[in-house]
Image (spheres, grey):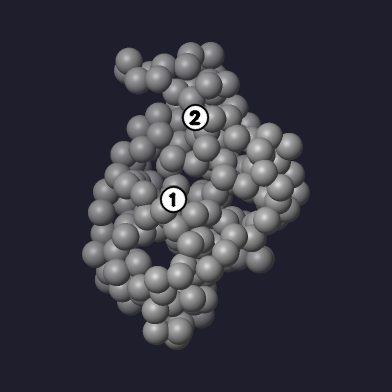
Amino acid sequence: MSEGTETGSTETGGRAMPPGQAVRREHKPLHYGRVPSFRPGRWDFRVFGTTESLGTYRWNWAEFTALPTVREVRDFHCVMRFSIPDVHWAGVSASELVRLAPPSAQTTHVMAWGEYGYSANMRLEDFLAEGVLLATRRDGAPLAPEHGFPLRLVVPQLYGWKSVKWLRSVEYMVGDRRGFWEERGYHNRADPWEEERFSHQEETDRP
């Protein structure tokens, strides 16, 4: 994937972009660590933590790809000050996942876990927001390895580091705790419309 050309615009098709963002049609993938190998026979996806049943839910690759899928067209906002409009995603909606693996009534947050221990935290309400999905396809094709194949979380209303690549599990939590980049100075919430980029912008003490 090429990095593409930055237009310098903050709008596309008459639709506003978040402040401080420039529109790009493509971008060089950004991630921490190397791209992991996918081994279908050994791969699984889990939901654990404060589930309603107190048990762990697990799907192998064949089981996960048999789940109902939806399509979403959403803008993608990177904390590195660029946005990609109208990205076509397909996968399992977060609301469907929660239907299949219900959280307890006390659950307030989730931690999304990727390969190599990468993590990102968010409020349960952000996880359940419209357009959030566990994506297996982008722009009509399976995810490219550098974009998170075989599975990535897409949380379009938050900055892109919350959209965890190479997703392996979701942990339900009764309180908040910081993920990988949040522990390293990024904002705990990450709302691009409020330019919540760094932890020093937070109004309250760290959890």
Q: Which residue is mark 1?
A: 126
Q: What type is the residue that disc 1 sits on?
A: Asp
Give left or right: position of 197 versus 148: right
Q: In 3D space, how far apart are the residues under numbered discs 1 and 2 (Cα atoms)?
A: 14 Å
Q: Earlier in the sequence, mark 1 or mark 2?
A: 1
Neighbor class of circle 1 (other Cα within 10 Å; few <14, some 14-19, many 20+) is: some
Give left or right: position of 2 versus 186: left
Q: Which residue is located at x 32 percent, y 15 percent?
A: 14
User: Residue 186: x, y in percent?
Assistant: 68, 43
**For the residue labelled by badge 1, is the local secondary structure a helix, a strand or a loop?**
helix
Q: Which residue is located at x 68 percent, y 34 percent?
A: 201
User: Residue 85: x, y in percent?
Assistant: 40, 29
Q: What type is the residue that disc 2 sits on?
A: Trp
**For the residue labelled by badge 2, is the local secondary structure a helix, a strand or a loop?**
helix
Q: Which residue is located at x 36 percent, y 49 percent?
A: 129
Give left or right: position of 17 versus 29: left
In the picture, the disc for residue 193 is 2
Q: Residue 120 sits in which quadrant? A: bottom right
* In contact (CB < 8 Å): disc 1 and disc 2: no
Image quarter (top left, top right, bottom left or bottom right) of the C terminus: bottom right
Q: Which residue is located at x 53 percent, y 14 percent?
A: 8
User: Residue 191: x, y in percent?
Assistant: 52, 37
In the picture, the disc for residue 33 is none
Neighbor class of circle 2 (other Cα within 10 Å; few <14, some 14-19, many 20+) is: some
- Front one among 28 and 50: 50
From this view, report whether residue 187 is shown above or below residue 90. Answer: above
